[in-house]
Image (cartoon, rainbow, N blue to C red):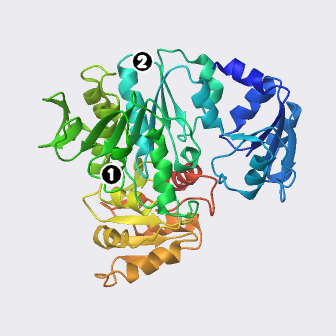
Amino acid sequence: MELGKYVEALRGRGIAVIGAGVSNAPLIRLLLRGGCDVTVYDVCDREKLGDAAARMEGMGARLSLGEGYLDRLEADVIFRTPGMRPDDPALVRADGRGCVITSEMEAFFEVCPCMTIGVTGSDGKTTTATITAQLLRRSGTTVHLGGNIGAPLLAEADGMSKDDIAVIELSSFQLMTMKRSPDIAVITNITPNHLDYHSDMDEYVNAKRNIFIHQGGGGIAVFNRDDALSYPLSRYAQGEIRLFGTEPVANGAFLEGGIIKYAENGTVESVLDASEIKIRGAHNVGNFMAAITAARGLTRRGAAAETARSFGGVEHGIEFVRERGGAKYYNDSIASSPARTAAGLRSFAEKVILIAGGKDKGVPFDSLAPEIIARVKTLVLTGLAAEKIRDAVVSCPGYAGEPEIIMSPGFADAVRAAAERAKRGDTVLLSPACTSFDVFANFEERGNCFKEIVNGLD
């Protein structure tokens, strides 16, 4: 269905949009400009929304804000924000009344006119989606990159042609209620994550599985052969299965002798010398292999090597900030899980000064503790999860007083404490292993704050 026809079909019906944040702002504008009757519901009050509230009202929206904002939820069609569980009592009641409950992402899949490549995973999905987009662009394809990566795509659908490709990062929150899957689906890996949101690990895994389960026989699903949780899901794939990993595979990318190779139809070709990859870490070699596997047949020869040599990584992903007094500072604010922080630590040969903490996801820090003991010289902790991380490290076998642990009351204090201890040759790494939601709106805001503080140091 074309986007215009989709919006036209909503006219004359009561539309509720839950969440007035960045991800829904283009949706709200699209619906209002299309002449729809829209009420925006948000837990934030008018003061916290600021000018955004007046702008939405100026365009014709009604607002239900603050405490009890869902008490009067009445609509024919409800667009759920990804952070709201689909079994929220307000949504259950609405469903019982016959309301249609959807989301910006679900609507996009209804109207998207071009091929879709979806990327999910506990770690690496942003980098993998970005690399995939770059491989395609270097091959002359018009690419639309968005989704959970920060750019909602629904409002842009009418500017897409059938020859374009949409590369979409998909979170477990978005995938939970998806009834369509992308043409090519990638799962980078699955580790315990978001257990503060999901009822249990099974629900989280099943949400990830949704990225390919609706494909049918014509789809392509890409799995990490090395990953104990995501690889077994391949048995549910109905279409072509492609793999990537550190050992040879029959159909997909693998690493052999430091070279990324691709196997297909009984032949093997060398694609890329892994040493050419500009961004740090073995996990990023895996991200390149995932992207190469997803984009196979859609890119020209040489695109992978060109991208490897030029791609400096995504913002907030082991991003070099500055050198000060001979010490180097890196921003890995995107690392919001213990597994992602462990991968970041393994990217450095030397022991680092690590800044970690924030709001935990209900995931234990036990697996991270040995990595911290082995790879961190000074650990600076802050945020709601600071004591949980400290306790995991102190109780870990092998802890004998090192690394030094500093508990810091505030984020800025933590950055300055790390800087005070940084000597020539040291590396200071912000890699929180937690979400930012105790202090910041998102990991981007946290990373930008870190960079501002570091760049302001004398």
From the top left corner, tell me how far across and down residue 272 is, in percent. Answer: 20, 33
Q: State the image coordinates of residue 227 (x, y, percent, origin top left).
A: 31, 53
Report which quarter residue 240 is drawn in: top left
The local secondary structure at tag 2 comes to loop
In the rendered image, the residue lying farthest to the left is 257
Please tell me whether residue 259 is drawn above or below residue 85 in the rendered image.
above
1 or 2: mark nearer the eye? 1
Amino acid bearing label 1: Pro
Q: Is residue 245 above or below residue 271?
A: below
Badge number at residue 141: 2
User: At label 2, which amino acid type do we have?
Assistant: Thr
**Side of 173 relative to 137 (left or right):** right
The alpha-carbon separation of the residues under discs 1 and 2 comes to 33 Å
374 relative to 54, above or below: below
- The residue that appears at 42% across and 78% down in the rendered structure is 392
Q: Earlier in the sequence, mark 1 or mark 2?
A: 2
Image position of 247 (left or right of 77): left
Q: Nearer the viewer, residue 80 or 181?
A: 181
Within 10 angstroms of label 1, few (less than 14), some, or many (20 or more) residues?
few
> What is the x, y in percent for residue 165?
46, 23
Q: Residue at x 30, y 54 (%)?
A: 347
User: What residue is shown with label 1?
Assistant: 232
Q: Is residue 458 visible?
A: no
Which one is in front, 342 or 173?
173
389 horizontally vs 445: left or right: left
Please give the name of the residue rendered at 24% of the width and 21% of the height, measured from the top-left corner: 301
Secondary element at image label 1 = helix
Indicate the position of residue 256 as horizontal and vertical percent values.
14, 42
Determine crowd level at label 2: few under 14, some 14-19, many 20+ residues with C-alpha closer than 10 A. Answer: some
Looking at this view, is 58 or 65 the one in front?
65
Q: Residue at x 39, y 73 (%)?
A: 366
The answer to whether the residues at label 1 and label 2 have Cβ atoms under 8 Å apart is no
